[in-house]
Image: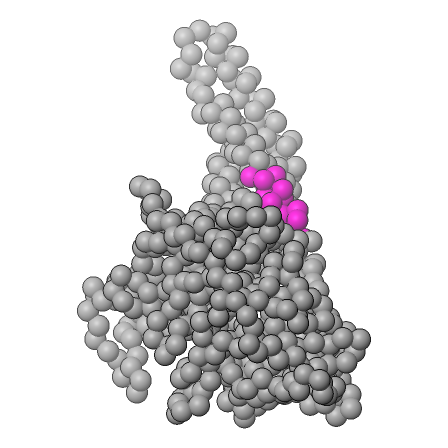
């Protein structure tokens, strides 16, 4: 499927050039702008999709608080508290590591605020309550009621082990913020017979054109690094060709990092990320776990718990992934992009209905359009903004800016389920008509015992032939419309494999009727 992103011409306002692409940079939407922070820089840069221009905010000095930009960090959560403020929590430094690895985990909190057009940092050190354990590559989401920021999972100190703890930062009053931990009640996963595949199997990402070409060329043997042909046993080739299967999920939500979390109507939902399998190796996953708060009072507070359970999903289930973006729009959980189990970038958007467990493909491309190796994305209103650079080592800048009108896709998908149901119904009606025609046309008048019965069957067959000839233009037009409708659904990312198969059978049976 081709990309629906539209490249925009960036305006040069006040000589604000695109920022350098650095590892660990995070994005958040504030003041209807994409705000970039983190990685190997303490600079804050904004992109305004309304003016298509880069901005570098001027920070007001906060003499009373003595606030300063947070130290450089990677793997921190950068989450909007409201339209004017965002929280930066934890992460890890790269000091002491030649390859920038996670050497020291952080647990500090910083507030980036833009109040009445004035930007400032608010350092929130020495927050009382249950101290947050240092972590990086965790996930955070906001519960709007009471402005409580939930932090789940991540990499523990040292970076060798993931976490499964849940902590909450009460941030209604920035001057009186408080941490408290939630008791985690872990549920075991019971995989019913004939459902294991639905729980553990995951569809691979769509192959790129380069992968298709490589697969065709690879029929005569694999290529090594130097280009030499490798003689790989057939058994290994068959094993390599099998679809990726997740290790069995044994407990929820499990220890994970590089995942996503969202809050919808007072419930927590965590998706994807990296977990350890029974063999001790790390794997990305596509599991959804649901967290229900167990309250002692009317509001979420210290002493409360979260009860996690596995959520069975269906529909267009996304492939296993990590390092993706997650948000909530119109009560749906939106998952965008990330990396698959081989580290390949993904250009897709999925929506999960938390009430039904139904996944829907909102958008998907094979990334053949992407000429750059590094990109960031952020939803601003109902627009998806993608910033791309040649690399993320500070040698190139986010010069390529594209916008996807995500709102239009959401609106179009509002009627796609009904459209799919109607197509299925129309195909079924046509197929029933084809079967009836074929049944009548196969009748042999000469096999009837009496002349009257022979005459009746002959008249019936002639009537069916006449009806077929008269209705043929209408039926052919109806089939053309159905084929175009299926093509449209496919372009919108809707899985149409079964409908395509039923339509093909319908066409074949109608061909038999005509002959």
Residue 343 is situated, as x and y percent measured from the top left of the image, at: 42, 73
Up-down: is 197 above or below 85? above
Query: Is 484 displayed left or right of 99 in the figure?
Result: right
Using the image as rendered, state which of residue 322 and residue 250 is in the foreground: 250
Query: Is 293 displayed left or right of 231 in the figure?
Result: right
Using the image as rendered, state which of residue 238 and residue 72 is in the foreground: 72
Using the image as rendered, state which of residue 167 and residue 507 is in the foreground: 167
Q: Which residue is located at x 44 percent, y 6 percent?
A: 450
Residue 40 is situated, as x and y percent measured from the top left of the image, at: 53, 88
Q: Is residue 420 magenta?
A: yes
Dividing the picture into quadrants, the one containing residue 418 is: top right
Chain part drawn in magenta = 412-424
Residue 7 is situated, as x and y percent measured from the top left of the image, at: 67, 76
Query: Is 310 displayed left or right of 35 in the figure?
Result: left
Colouring convention used in this rendered image of the protein:
one colour
Q: Which residue is located at x 51 percent, y 44 percent?
A: 499
Up-down: is 21 above or below 489? below
Dividing the picture into quadrants, the one containing residue 20 is: bottom right
Residue at the extreme right = 116
Up-down: is 301 above or below 509? below
Is residue 326 at least partly visible in the picture? no
Q: Main secondary structure of the magenta part?
A: helix
Q: Which residue is located at x 55 percent, y 29 percent?
A: 433
Image mark count: 0
Using the image as rendered, state which of residue 423 and residue 86 is in the foreground: 86
Q: Is residue 137 magenta?
A: no
Is residue 268 at least partly visible in the picture? yes
User: The N terminus lies in which quarter of the figure?
Assistant: bottom right
Residue 142 is situated, as x and y percent measured from the top left of the image, at: 60, 62
């Amino acid at each position: 499927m081709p990309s629906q992103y539209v490249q925009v011409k960036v305006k040069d306002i006040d000589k604000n050039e695109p920022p350098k692409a650095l590892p660990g940079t995070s994005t958040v939407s504030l003041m209807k702008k994409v705000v970039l922070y983190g990685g190997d820089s303490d600079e804050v840069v904004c992109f305004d999709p309304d003016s298509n221009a880069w901005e570098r905010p001027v920070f007001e000095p906060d003499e009373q608080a003595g606030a300063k930009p947070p130290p450089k960090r990677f793997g921190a959560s950068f989450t909007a508290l409201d339209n004017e403020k965002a929280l930066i929590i934890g992460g890890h430094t790269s000091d002491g590591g030649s390859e920038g690895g996670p050497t020291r985990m952080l647990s500090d909190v910083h507030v980036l605020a833009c109040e009445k057009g004035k930007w400032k940092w608010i350092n929130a050190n020495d927050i009382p309550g249950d101290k947050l354990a240092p972590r990086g590559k965790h996930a955070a989401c906001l519960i709007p009621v009471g402005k409580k920021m939930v932090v789940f999972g991540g990499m523990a100190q040292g970076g060798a082990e993931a976490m499964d703890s849940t902590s909450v930062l009460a941030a209604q009053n920035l001057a009186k913020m408080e941490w408290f931990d939630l008791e985690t009640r872990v549920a075991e996963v019971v995989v019913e017979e004939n459902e294991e595949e639905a729980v553990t199997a995951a569809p691979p990402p769509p192959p790129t054109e380069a992968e298709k070409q490589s697969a065709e060329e690879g029929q005569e043997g694999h290529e090594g690094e130097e280009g030499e042909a490798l003689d790989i046993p057939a058994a290994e080739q068959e094993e390599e060709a099998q679809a990726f299967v997740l290790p069995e999920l044994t407990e929820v939500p499990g220890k994970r990092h590089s995942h996503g979390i969202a809050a919808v109507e007072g419930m927590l939902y965590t998706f994807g990320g990296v977990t350890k399998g029974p063999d001790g190796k790390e794997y990305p996953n596509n599991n959804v776990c649901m967290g229900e708060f167990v309250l002692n009072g009317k509001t979420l507070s210290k002493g409360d718990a979260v009860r996690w359970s596995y959520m069975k999903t269906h529909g267009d289930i996304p492939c296993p992934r990590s390092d993706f973006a997650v948000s909530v729009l119109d009560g749906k959980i939106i998952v965008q992009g990330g990396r698959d189990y081989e580290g390949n970038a993904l250009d897709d958007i999925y929506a999960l209905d938390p009430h039904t467990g139904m996944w829907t493909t909102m958008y998907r491309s094979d990334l053949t359009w992407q000429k750059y190796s590094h990109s960031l994305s952020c939803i601003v209103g109902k627009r998806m903004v993608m910033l791309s650079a040649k690399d993320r080592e500070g040698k190139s800048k986010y010069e390529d800016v594209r916008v996807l009108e995500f709102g239009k896709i959401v609106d179009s998908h509002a009627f796609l389920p009904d459209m799919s149901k109607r197509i299925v119904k129309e195909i079924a009606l046509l197929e029933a008509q084809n079967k009836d025609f074929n049944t009548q046309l196969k009748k042999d008048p000469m096999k009837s015992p009496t002349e009257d019965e022979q005459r009746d069957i002959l008249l019936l067959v002639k009537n069916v032939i006449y009806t077929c000839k008269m209705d043929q233009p209408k039926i052919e037009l109806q089939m053309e419309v159905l084929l175009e409708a299926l093509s449209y659904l496919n372009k919108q990312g809707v899985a149409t494999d079964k409908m395509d198969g039923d339509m093909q059978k319908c066409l074949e049976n109608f061909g038999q009727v005509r002959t």
